[in-house]
Amino acid sequence: MTYEEALAHYRSALTDADAFVAPLRDTDDPEAVLWAAWQTVTGAAATADDPELARLVDLVTAVQRRELPGVRVWNLRVCTDLPVLGAQLREEWNGGRPIAEWTALNSFAARLTAAGTHDALLLGLWTISAALETFDGPPENLPAAVEWFRHAGSQLAGATVHGRTYAARLGPLAEQAGVPDPPAGFSFQRWAFWRRRLESLSTEGARLIKRYDSTIATGRLDPR
């Protein structure tokens, strides 16, 4: 199956994990099939409402539970390791989507992270940084950032407690506020800065992040 043939197949295979996996069983080019598959998924996510996003996450989770012994891409197991999904999501983070689609994509990535299906916290960090740590980020990125606190707040709090770091710089507003860098990533100081910014930018955003303040204060992973 070629990439173009795979695109045509996946446009009608976004509700059935078995139909999703079927082209990968006998193809000579599983990487091309996966690029078509995940491109179709992220394209659908960009225009999906809440129930549709939940169904897409369920689909990806069901695909991950399938087994294709011996089929690998980039030395990763298909479907268990979900190769190419992360790369396709990373492509989406290059920009160019309208605000509503960008918000939906972030909601999708946050839900995948919360489900334990795919860890996209780095993408969430980039979105939150763009929304809260730059001079011109809030208008297009704040709704997307709120989706991370809404759906993956526990994971963001856990990353803060454990001080997860990435090769990514702080935004200029965070630097001016004295948030330590390097290493960039999740930190108590950065969390406190986000909280202050959300309080000034969005009542809803502030309400969402406050749910996880007790987690940060106590070092527990369960904010309830």
Image (cartoon, rainbow, N blue to C red):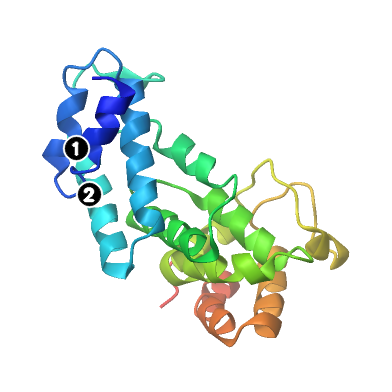
The disc placed on residue 36 is: none
Marks 1 and 2, how far apart at CA: 9 Å
Measured as percent of width and height from the top left, residue 171 is found at 77, 57
- Circle 2 packing at 10 Å, graded few (<14), some (14-19), many (20+), is many
Q: Are marks 1 and 2 in contact (CB under 8 Å)?
A: yes
Q: Residue pushed farthest bottom? A: 203
Q: Which residue is depicted at the point 58% across and 70% down?
A: 216
On the image, the x and y values in percent for residue 136 come to 75, 65
Q: Hey, what amino acid is under mark 2?
A: Leu
Q: Which residue is mark 1?
A: 20
Residue with the mark numbered 2: 59
Question: Of helix, strand and loop, which one carries label 2?
Answer: helix
The residue drawn where x is 64% and y is 47% is 165
161 and 123: which is toward the camera? 123
170 to the left or right of 36? right
Residue at coordinates 52% horizontally, 52% vertically from top-left?
121
